[in-house]
Amino acid sequence: MNTCILKVALTVVMCGPAAVCVAGSLSKDLQNVSSTTDVIVQFSPNVTSSIAALSVAILKRGGSLKKQFSHVKGAVFTLTPDAIAELANNPDVAYASPDRKIFGKLEFAEPTTGANIALQYGYDGTGVGVAIIDSG
């Protein structure tokens, strides 16, 4: 019980009277960035400003807009470490994370489908046609 009271007291002291700490709005990967980074910024769903106005505020802090999302309140920015640190203090930012590169892997698909056996015999799919029939 005393530990819980201590945690609440520390939260109020560290985060101010509102007792809401926005440092959690940054991904752990962005906490100690030392170079310019592509960052996905998700704006709060109940934000009253326009996305364009929020983007301008971020751009003034040394960032550049890379892509704005049309169906989600967010965008990808190229940001300096100082601009990334400022995101944690912006109440309109719900979450920010690095724009990570993604790629597919087939380490489970190959043995599951038996493709590894076909590859052992030199089959690679050359000359194979595939048809998809949708009846409904």
Image (tube, helix red, strand yellow):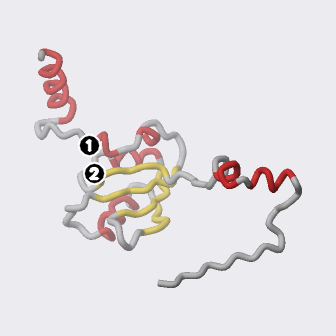
User: Residue farthest to the front?
Assistant: 135
User: Residue farthest to the top?
Assistant: 2
Q: Residue at x 68, y 55 (%)?
A: 113
What secondary structure is found at the residue carrying circle 2? Answer: loop
Q: Residue at x 26, y 58 (%)?
A: 44
What secondary structure is found at the residue carrying circle 1? Answer: helix
Amino acid carrying mark 1 in the image: Val
Is 93 placed left or right of 115 in the picture? Answer: left
Q: Earlier in the sequence, mark 2 or mark 1?
A: 1
Q: Nearer the viewer, mark 2 or mark 1?
A: 1
* x, y percent for residue 112: 65, 50
* x, y percent for residue 85: 38, 44
Q: How many marks?
A: 2
The quadrant the N terminus occupies is top left
Amino acid carrying mark 2 in the image: Asn
Residue receiving disc 2 = 90
What crowding class fits label 1: few (fewer than 14 Cα within 10 Å), some (14-19), or many (20 or more)?
A: some
Residue 42 occupies which quadrant of the picture?
A: bottom left
Is 47 placed left or right of 82 in the picture? Answer: left
For the residue pair 103 and 47, the one nearer the viewer reads as 103
> In the displayed structure, would residue 123 be above or below residue 29?
below
CA–CA distance in space, label 2 to label 1: 8 Å
Q: Residue at x 26, y 43 (%)?
A: 22
Residue 69 occupies which quadrant of the picture?
A: bottom left
For the residue pair 29 and 15, the one nearer the viewer reads as 29
Residue receiving disc 1 = 22
For the residue pair 69 and 56, the one nearer the viewer reads as 69
Dot 2 and dot 1 residues touching (CB under 8 Å): yes
Is 43 placed left or right of 47 in the picture? Answer: right
